[in-house]
Every structure is written in structure tokens, then in C-alpha cells.
Amino acid sequence: MATMTVRAVRKRSDDYFFCCMAILILAIVFIGFAQTYYLAGMFRAHLPTVLIHVHGALMTCWILLFIVQVALVSAKRVDWHMRLGILGMVLAGLIVPIALATLIQTVRHRYAVFGKNLSIVSAGDVLQLSLFAALIIWGFFVRRNGPVHKRLMLLAMVTLLGPAVARWPFAFSVLVFFLICDVVPLLLILFDLWSFKKVHFVTLWGVLLILAMQISILPLAHSAFWHHVTVWVQNV
């Protein structure tokens, strides 16, 4: 009886935690794109090309789908969650190529990216999208394992936060930038320690991959190889 009570409490805590993380991610993204996209009327916003509009719509649908999926699990509608999961995989399969095409277009036409260095932006986006795809594929193959699947999907969402945080209408250092991006992984680690008395193995590996990705952005952006890639894309 006591074991069943502990499991029920842990399940309810999981529901609250992942719902709160979904809302936090939504808030982070909304703050970043509020002025230029959401409050500007989304498809009425003055963006350089139609492709960027499509990219913004797909990313918005992905975030909203993530919130709905978390809510369905909390409401014990796992059957609906699994059906929508098919839509999620299709959407994820569209997000990566469309995002890459948008990035190529941005680099080729040298669109202003809020005063950011195009090499840094492009290197960061490529690494983030690559890790996003890897975590999503991993999450798909372990979708029957609830605790592992939900952590992978949450960490996959974290890989997409960089562009949103970079557009926050506040001035802050690079250290603060990464701290904001990593607030969700940090909270996930603390939740694991509180819930399991240890860090879940998939949390550990996911966070390590995210940190490795973040550390690799500047070295890649400043490398001769990436400089040649950027110049090649601009001249194609």
C-alpha cells in the first residue's frame, strides 16, 4: 500500500513538473519572438521571406503540440498522446529541413540577425538542429518507456531555445545566455534528485550532449572549415 502511494505521488509530481517545464519553454520562446513575430501578427509580421514565415509557423506548432502532449499524459489520455505522436514525428521531420533551408537562405542573403555574427548563428543553428534530431529519434525508439521518452522530448525542446533567448529584448552576457538556455536541464536534474535520489541516466546523457553542443559552437564558428562553408553558401 505504501509503495502504491509513493508511486502515485511520484506520478503526480511528474505531471506537475513536466507541465511547468512546458509552460516555461513557451514563455522563453514567446519573450524572444514576441516583438518580431507573435505580437506583430505572425503571418502579418514583416519577415524577409515566405520560408521564414513557414519556419516560424512550424516551430510554433511544435511547441504547442509539446504542451498538448504533456497535458494529455497528465490527464491520463495516453491513447490520444500516442495518436498525436505520429503527427509529432511528421512535424519534427519537417522542422529540421525547413530550418536548415531557412538558415541557408539567411546566410546566402546576409539577412541581419540582430547584429549577430552569421558564422556563430549558423554554427549554433546547425549543431542545435543536429542534436534536436538525434534526441527526437532516440525518443521515438524508446517511446514505450515513459520516464525516458518524456525526458528526451523535454531535452530536445531545450536545443531549440538558443535562437529565442538570443532575441530577448534585454542586454546580457554570453554566460547569462547559456544559463537561461540551461535552466530547464538544471531543473530536470534537481527534479530527478528529489524524485529518484539520483540523476536519471537519460537526463545525464542528454544534459552532457547539450553542454557538449554549446561548448562546440564558438570553436566551430571560428574554424577555417566553417568560414569556408559560410563563404561557399553565400556564393552558391
Image (cartoon, rainbow, N blue to C red):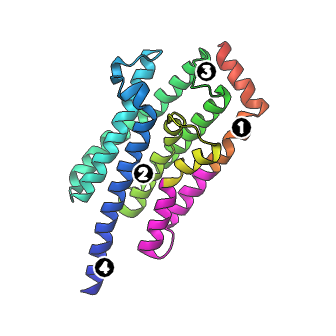
Instruction: Work out whether residue 75 or residue 178 is closer to the camera in this orientation and state it.
Output: 178
Q: Residue at x 26, y 50 (%)?
A: 81
Q: Residue at x 61, y 52 (%)?
A: 211
Task: For the residues labelled 1 and 2, say whether their Cβ atoms are less than 8 Å apart.
Answer: no
The spot of residue 182 in percent (x, y) is 54, 52
Q: CA distance from mark 1 to mark 4?
A: 47 Å
The secondary element bearing badge 2 is classed as: helix
Instruction: Work out whether residue 172 or residue 114 is closer to the camera in this orientation and state it.
Output: 172
Q: Amino acid at mark 1?
A: Leu
| Mark positioned earlier in the residue sequence (2 or 3) | 3
Q: Residues within 10 Å of mark 4 (few under 14, many from 20)?
A: few
Task: For the residues labelled 3 and 1, say whether their Cβ atoms are less than 8 Å apart.
Answer: no
| Mark positioned earlier in the residue sequence (1 or 4) | 4
In the picture of the structure, the residue carrying the numbered disc 4 is 6
Disc marking residue 153: 2
Q: CA distance from mark 2 to mark 3?
A: 29 Å
Q: Amino acid at mark 3?
A: Val
In the picture of the structure, the residue carrying the numbered disc 1 is 220
Disc marking residue 107: 3
